[in-house]
Image: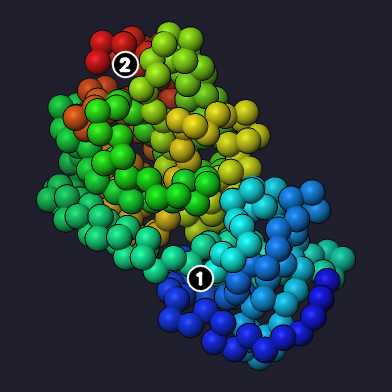
Amino acid sequence: MLLVAVATAGLLGCAQKNESQEDENEEGHALLGVIQAVDEEGLTLTVAHEEIPDFMPPMTMVFRVGPGDVQVFKEGDQIRARMIRDEDGGFRLIKIWKIDDKAASEMRKVNERLAKEAEKLASGYYLAEGDTFPEFALLDQYGNTVTPAQYEGKPFMLNFIFTRCTDGEMCPLSTSKMASLQKMAADAGLEKLEFISVSLDPQYDSPGVLRAYADAYGIDGKNFKFVTGEREAVRQLIKTMALTRIEADDDIIHSLATVLVDGDRKIVMRSTKKTWEPAAFLEAAKAL
């Protein structure tokens, strides 16, 4: 897998090296580097990485990655990731995130406002129909920043899922319903209706993982964004919707919240049930 060893110390300069998503007990090694090449067919990234303390000197290597990663990242991107061993002894990158100081700073400012909004809510209270949906800033399955401000004048559907969810009546069903509603809205001529699914598992659900998840459901990403980001921002957004989220081994036990938000960011319809009907939300969207 090794291509060529090069001197890459200080490769990222003063770039953001935020690893707050990571747990010290996670498998593999933290890696910082710059993408040199992307092989979509071979599902690999060539990365010039900095020294990995007590493990590997700086060098350029070819890493296996997921199918979504080769679609999200491009040559020249600065990244942080976890490097792990494949079964055959090769190296693979997981949990890949682009390092972008400017975008991170702008997102942090927005999410500070989200935190203040969440702090106003007493325990057990949440934003209900008629309330203004809060600001947030997260990354979508293309690696782009998503904020409600981008949807000014446009209604949007929003729910919460995570890609490793195996309960067929929870995330898989919710995603299938959102995908069905997206198609129903297109057939009904609701061109302005947008869709957002927020990951409850940002530590695992990187943009590349979300890209593969969306593709697996055959979802058109033009108006359907799967978003992830800093755990604290996701936690605050969850709080505003009063979702239950409990980590248990490799699973997350959680409740549901599906909302329709109008073009003025007012919540016009909210459901916490598994049995929410896409047709009901479609009719509400038609009335906007």
Asked whether 234 or 186 is in front, the reply is 186
Asked whether 6 or 83 is in front, the reply is 6
Identify residue type, mark 1.
Asp
Q: Which residue is at a point 26% across and 41% down the rendered structure image?
A: 149
Q: CA distance from mark 2 to mark 1?
A: 41 Å
Residue designated by label 2: 285
123 to 14, vertically: above or below: above
Q: Which residue is at a point 47% across and 54% down the rendered structure image?
A: 202
Which residue of the protein is positioned furthest toward the right in this rendering? Answer: 88
Residue 277 is at least partly visible in this image: no
Residue 31 is at least partly visible in this image: yes
Residue 194 location (% of width, % of height): 39, 28
Quadrant holding the C terminus = top left
Report helix, strand or loop for mark 1.
loop
Q: Which residue is at a point 39% across and 69% down the rendered structure image?
A: 101
252 to 90, vertically: above or below: above
Identify residue type, mark 2.
Ala
Residue 63 location (% of width, % of height): 74, 66
Residue designated by label 1: 23
